[in-house]
Amino acid sequence: MQSLLAITWLTWKAAFRFRLFIVVAVLLLATVVGLPILIKDDGTARGFTQILLAYTLSTITALLGLSTLWLACGTLARDIEECQIQMIAVKPVARWQIWLGKWLGIVTLNAALLAISGFSVYGLLQWRATKLPEAEQKILRNEVLVARGSAREPTHEKDLEAEASRRLDEALAKAMGAKLDVAAMRRQILEALKAELQVVPPGYTRPWQIDLGFAKYYLRDQPLYLRVKFNAAEKSPSGTFDALWMVGVPEKTKLWRTEVPMSLAPDTFHEFQIPANLFDEQGVLTILFVNPNNTALLFPLDDGMEVLYREGGFGLNFARGLGIIFCWMILLTTLGLAAASFLSFPVAAFATLAVLMMSLSTGTLASAVEQGTVMGQDEETGQIGRSPVDAVAIPFFRAALRIINLAKDFSPIDSLSSGRSITWTELGKAFGQIVLLLGGIIAMVGIWSFSRRELATAQGTQ
């Protein structure tokens, strides 16, 4: 343990010697102070706070991520290239202790930097909140600076898949052996089924029955919030559409309805409060939407309707969000050290940045996997192209997505900026998937590579 801590301290000294810690700390503090001046918001305290949280935390994560990769690759690769590692390797210190000592040094550096920047963001938010009128402070405390749980309608994936398979079989039977693109037909049938559930024609209604689960026991006498989003088939002259709502079941629960139609814009999220105690004894909240417009409206299955409710305070929720970001930094530290264990500094830095860029391009990868090709869709014909590269690229993209999603399944920045609750279970799952599973595998590869590497061949050039 003494050897491990000694190498950790040497890593800290190197970070201060290269002025890395000071430079990154100054950049992080400049981000916290400077972004509020540059940010353009919608003029409301809620909009400004949401954008401030999203921008500052995203910038902090990016700066820490890049500095982590640079230091993790440089601290080991440069020691090997400059023949400084031999001075440590000849001592009674195991290779794994050297590797873990550097890892622990960078991880603790990140912890200190993240704590400084996180405390600054939290303090800035609290200070600005006290300067607002009482009404605006109440909005912030209820909708942004809070930890809110959510409930949605159950997914219909299995039912949709089963119905799509049934309709596909019927279509193939009628085709009498004709050559058809079965995958494309299945996608079209599935999209048509989703449209049946999502689209609300003019004059029609769309019901949701949302089970609040265990939360029903502590939500009595507590107000709830509906978060809705829809798309429109046609544009409106005013840019908005009318919406009529009714929440509750006659003769079973209290009822709430809009006396005057709400004017809501499409393609954006809207939140509005509804009274307490509108759900039934089983904890099911029934919501009914009436479309009084002359055009169809589409509520997406994944985020078209959501019920939000208070679960806790902002401070602890903010700390759990920083905990997930810290898990990301641990993974980047492990990745950088593992690359530097068998690559030179420039190559290790390039390779880790390539992996980072791939992780940020999951949307493109997912689109290619969904279409089954890297060629994309032809703009003139509308047909999806095919390439011999697909046989290798698509399986690789699919495997890469599964690995990357283990770390990207968690979205603390989005949750914090929208007042969503980050549970201890989510934090524990993030630690297990990001640090223990992904980080553990990468660390074992890095330690094994470093232990097998012949250090005596690394000689400096004259």
Image: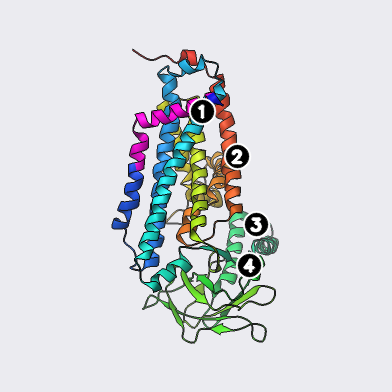
Kind of residue at disc 4? Ala
Specify which label sits upstream in the sequence, 2 or 1. Answer: 1
Q: How is the image coloured?
A: rainbow
**Which residue lies under the disc numbered 3?**
178
Kind of residue at disc 2? Leu
- Identify the image quadrant of residue 150: bottom right
**Residue 416 lies within the magenta run:** no
Q: Taking 160 as reference, is 446 above or below it?
A: above
Closer-to-camera residue (57/406): 57
> In the rendering, which numbered label is found on residue 215?
4
Nearer to us of marks 1 and 4 is: 1
Nearer to us of marks 3 and 4 is: 4
Nearer to us of marks 2 and 1 is: 1
| Main SS, magenta residues | helix
Q: Are marks 1 and 4 in contact (CB under 8 Å)?
A: no
**Which residue lies under the disc numbered 1?**
5
Closer-to-camera residue (340/22): 22
Q: Mark 4: which secondary structure?
A: helix
Specify which label sits upstream in the sequence, 1 or 4. Answer: 1
- One can see residue 382 in this view: no
Q: Is residue 35 left or right of residue 114?
A: left
Q: Taking 9 as reference, is 290 above or below it?
A: below
Q: Position of residue 418 (x, y in %)?
A: 47, 62
Instruction: Determine the residue positioned at 66% across, 62% down.
Output: 164
Question: Dot 4: within a 10 Å radius of its alpha carbon, few (fewer than 14), some, or many (20 or more) residues?
Answer: some
Instruction: Determine the residue positioned at 40% across, 38% down.
Output: 67
Q: CA distance from mark 3 to mark 1?
A: 70 Å
Specify which label sits upstream in the sequence, 4 or 2. Answer: 4
> In the rendering, which numbered label is found on residue 436?
2
Closer-to-camera residue (211/398): 211
Task: Give, as a single range, the part of the protein colored magenta.
Answer: 3-25
